[in-house]
Image (tube, grey):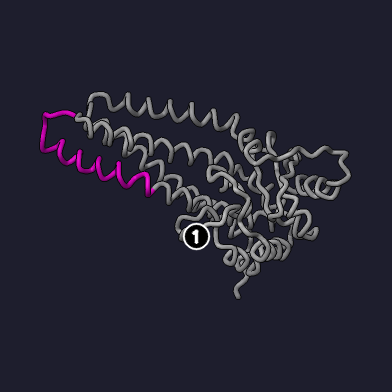
Amino acid sequence: MEKKSFYDEIAKNRRNSWVLGIIIFSFLIGLVYIISQIFAPELSLIFLIFAGIFMLIYTYGSYMYGDRIVLASTKAKLVKEDDRRYTHLVNVVDGLSIAAGIPKPKIYVIESEEINAFATGRDPQHSSVAVTTGLLRNLKRNEIEGVIGHELSHIRNYDIRFATFVAVLVGLIAILSDMFRRTLWYGGGRRDDRDRGSILLIVGVILAIFAPIIVRLVQLAISRKREYLADSSSVQLTRYPEGLASALEKIKNINKGKMKVSEAVSHLFFTDPNKSGLDSLYATHPPIEKRIKILRSM
């Protein structure tokens, strides 16, 4: 098997994530433009400004308070520095934070038999990492280092901020599409310039129906790309891909997918915390088998 540099994996996944983000942004601009041209061509600029302001307000709220909501929803409990039960965990986070060149995040523990973890926060200076009690019980030190390295990489790579930005775009597209469909249902739009209006109307209806579906699939693809990126970045920190690969193998064999975590935050976790029968196209995480294969090719 051809060995791959983790630098190559990092560069490829970062590039792919931004390409997918640009696709979502393009759908948003296209949808706003078509809607404005159908209902009020002379107000196109105002429509675009309104969309921008709405996006900024929504993003700011998610940016400032999203981590508190996530930690509360998962019932994560803050670890005190002098708590001897978690000395080993604190030391791992401390050492890898230094290696990553970021401030040490706050550490939380979630009571669960499942092996899992997640990172949250608006930037490296305001970040947290949470792990399950199942992770601490079942993983060896080098395996824990691999998982923590993965989560710290999400923080260092600003993945949470990027994911928030993408989620805002996807949400805004869904809102605009719903508004457009409701307006058509109750009868609206201009009646002049019928030929041009008919073409725009058809394009608008197609976008309103399919844009939310397409951008949601793109969002899931971005989520998977960022997981690959964090895997590669973890290897960069630990210099030991087998630790993370071994942790993933244990997760595959032990986890039952019964954490009952809200789908709104499930994408933040190291692996999908909920058992899902959905096709891989709709998954928030890459297949574990593929992640292991890539790690062992490094």
Say if 173 sits above or below 189 in the image: below
On whether residue 195 falls in the magenta region, the answer is yes
Percent of width and height locating residue 106: 74, 38
User: How many marks do you count on the picture?
Assistant: 1
On the image, which quarter does residue 34 sit in?
top left
Percent of width and height locating residue 269: 62, 49
- Which residue is pictured at 75% across the width and 56% down the height? 144
The residue that label 1 is drawn on is: 277
Say if 255 sits above or below 28 in the image: below
Q: Residues within 10 Å of mark 1 (few under 14, many from 20)?
A: few
Q: Nearer the viewer, residue 79 or 19?
A: 79
Percent of width and height locating residue 20: 45, 49
- Magenta span: predominant SS is helix
Where are the magenta residues, as a range?
A: 189-214
Residue 257 visible from this viewpoint: yes
| Quarter of the figure with the C terminus | bottom right
- Which residue is pictured at 80% across the width and 45% down the height? 94
- Locate residue 261 relative to residue 103 in the image: left or right: left
On the image, which quarter does residue 241 sit in?
bottom right
On the image, which quarter does residue 142 sit in?
bottom right
Percent of width and height locating residue 103: 74, 38
Say if 96 sits above or below 190 in the image: below
On whether residue 199 falls in the magenta region, the answer is yes
Q: Nearer the viewer, residue 107 or 14?
A: 107
Numbered disc 1: secondary structure: loop
Amino acid on which the number 1 mark rests in the picture = Gly
- Which residue is pictured at 22% across the width and 29% down the height? 39
